[in-house]
Image (cartoon, grey):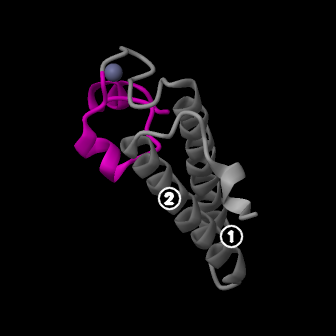
Amino acid sequence: MPLDTSRTEPHPEPAATHETRRRLEHARTTSLTQLHALTENTHTNEQLMSTQTSAIRQTLQDIDTAFARLEAGTYGTCRTCGTSIPEERLEILPYTSYCVTCRHRTTA
Ligand SMILES: [Zn+2]
């Protein structure tokens, strides 16, 4: 009996969702690598390191939020105005929760 049969899902994910998941995973891996490199490098100025570390931690938090939004079906819409975030923007920043207009208005 092949083990694969149990992995069949009743509702297969749309290709776009799968692609988004892949992008988010990639972004998370990149952030974790950066975080690791940063903490490994003892020559880095402490102040600078703490600034960069918290920026990366923020990104990782954004990625978690994006995953949750993907599950909830709200991924890709702006949290402030509710418009769809352009695909080009999501390609560059897959974990963003705001459209360009709102991003400039908030610091989040
Ligand atoms: Zn917006």
Ligand 1 is in which quadrant of the figure? top left
Q: Which residue is found at the position 63% from the left and 44% from the top?
A: 61
Camera-side residue: 15 or 62? Answer: 15
Residue drawn at x 45%, y 21% is 79
Count of numbered labels shown in the rendering: 2
- Please state the horizontal and vertical placement of residue 67, each as a whole percent of the image: 58, 40
**On screen, 51 above or below 39?**
above
Residue located beneath label 2 in the image: 27
x then y, percent, for residue 10: 59, 34
Please say whether residue 66 is one of the residues in the magenta stretch.
no
Residue type pointed to by label 1:
Glu
**Figure quadrant of residue 82:** top left
Asked if marks 1 and 2 touch (Cβ < 8 Å), the reply is: no
| Residue visible at 60% across and 41% down in the picture | 9
- Image: 20 above or below 73: below
- Residue for badge 1: 46
* Residue 99 image position (x, y, % from top left): 32, 29
Q: Amino acid at mark 2?
A: Ala
Secondary structure beneath dot 1 equals helix
Decide which of 15, 41 is in the foreground and name it: 15
Magenta highlight range = 84-108
* Residues at marks 1 and 2, CA–CA distance in whole angstroms: 25 Å
Question: Is residue 100 rendered to the left or right of residue 51?
Answer: left
Mark with earlier residue (1, 2) = 2
